[in-house]
Amino acid sequence: MAYNYSNGMDIDDAPTGPRVTVRKAETDRVNFVLSSVDLALANSLRRILLAEIPTVSIDLVDVKANTSVLPDEFIAHRLGLIPLNSKDCHKDMNYTRDCDCEGSCERCTVTLELQAKCQNQDKMAVWARDLVPIGMRPNQWVGVPVIKDSEGNGPLILKLRRGQEINMICTAKKGIAKEHAKWAPTAAVGFEYDPKNQLRHTTYWYEDNPETEWPIDEGNAAWETADTGGEQAFDADAKPESFFFDVEGVGTLEPDQIVQQGIKQLQNKLAEILHVLAGAGEQDGEDGQDEDGYDPEAAGGGYTSYGHTNGLRDGGQSSWGGGLGGATSYGGTAYGQNGYSY
């Protein structure tokens, strides 16, 4: 299927290969057409945009004081869903599981403080703006609550009555939506191809009229050329080549950053597959191993992965200590220095 690109902006001017045409770009939304690729690659990009773009979100909450009517767990859950600015966190911030620190540091975590106390007769609202980053941060943007409303408050966290207070220390970490939805950078990713259903990839269920009950997206259908009209004969071997994306962010990352990081993540995955496939054959026959990976024991004893052996039970030092009992990684054996008795 072919599409008309005269109304859009081509990022790639090359006549062949994948092409991205941006049709509409806003502060929190981008609409583009991905063409000259197959369905598997386009769908892979869609899945990555939804679940594998790293962002920053509150993961741990240390409750110092909470006299509100809401339980600690309820508030902690709401705090985790507050969007935090995650600009450049993919390169300036480490995952806590990969960091060299003991537990947390400025390279892998961002600390925020939430402290409020109601001293008035009326109820007091606690907003996302009351979350204040403290300490060192990976960069000047990461960890700041995303606030888009005209009042500058951000999402509502809870309300306090007179005399009630809340004091919490929050730890934000880097993660992806595969681990938890709070790390999702997008609110939705619209994905469509073949808007006129020329390929018959789906069958519409309808009551009276499918054209009124399943209206066609005219914006996407207008990009199809005239040679794909309804009067054309059905081609069972036809494949889609252009795909319509509508990416809506939640504010943690700009839409263009989401798409660029998604493409980079896809490239990294493909590169890793190629690297593994290329290295699989190079390991066969190396280090004295057979092609099936079997490493035979040396005749007459020798050092193996299980220690020095000589064909008898009283082998030498192994990864668990001496061959006849002795100290192991869990301390001395329960049977003494000489191990088991036969």
Image (tube, grey):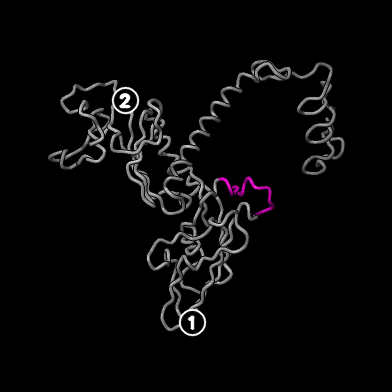
- Classify the position of the N terminus by image quarter: top left
- Above or below residue 37? Residue 178 is below
In the picture, residue 42 is in which quadrant? Answer: top left
| Three-letter code, disc 2 | Lys
Q: Residue furthest left?
A: 208
Residue 253 x, y percent position in the rendering: 46, 50
Q: Which mark is residue 252?
A: none
Is 41 left, or right, of 277 in this rendering? left
User: Magenta residues, as a range?
Assistant: 91-104
| Three-letter code, disc 1 | Gln
Residue at horizontal 66 percent and vertical 54 percent from the top: 103
Q: Nearest the camera: 158 or 224?
A: 224
* Residue assigned mark 1: 119
Q: Is residue 211 magenta?
A: no
Density class for disc 1 (Cα within 10 Å; few <14, some 14-19, many ≥20) is some
Q: Secondary structure at mark 1?
A: loop
Residue 149 x, y percent position in the rendering: 38, 63
Q: Secondary structure at mark 2?
A: loop
* Residue assigned mark 2: 239
- Classify the position of the C terminus by image quarter: top right
Is 96 left, or right, of 324 in this rendering? left
Give the spatial CA distance, label 2 vs label 1. Answer: 66 Å
Residue 272 x, y percent position in the rendering: 55, 30
- Above or below residue 331? Residue 65 is below
Foreground mark, 2 or 1, reads 2
Residue at horizontal 73 percent and vertical 19 percent from the top: 287
Mark 1 or mark 2, which is nearer the start of the sequence?
1
- Above or below residue 91? Residue 231 is above
Chief SS of the magenta region = loop
Q: Nearest the camera: 136 or 298?
A: 136
The answer, for residue 302, to whether it is visible in the render is: yes
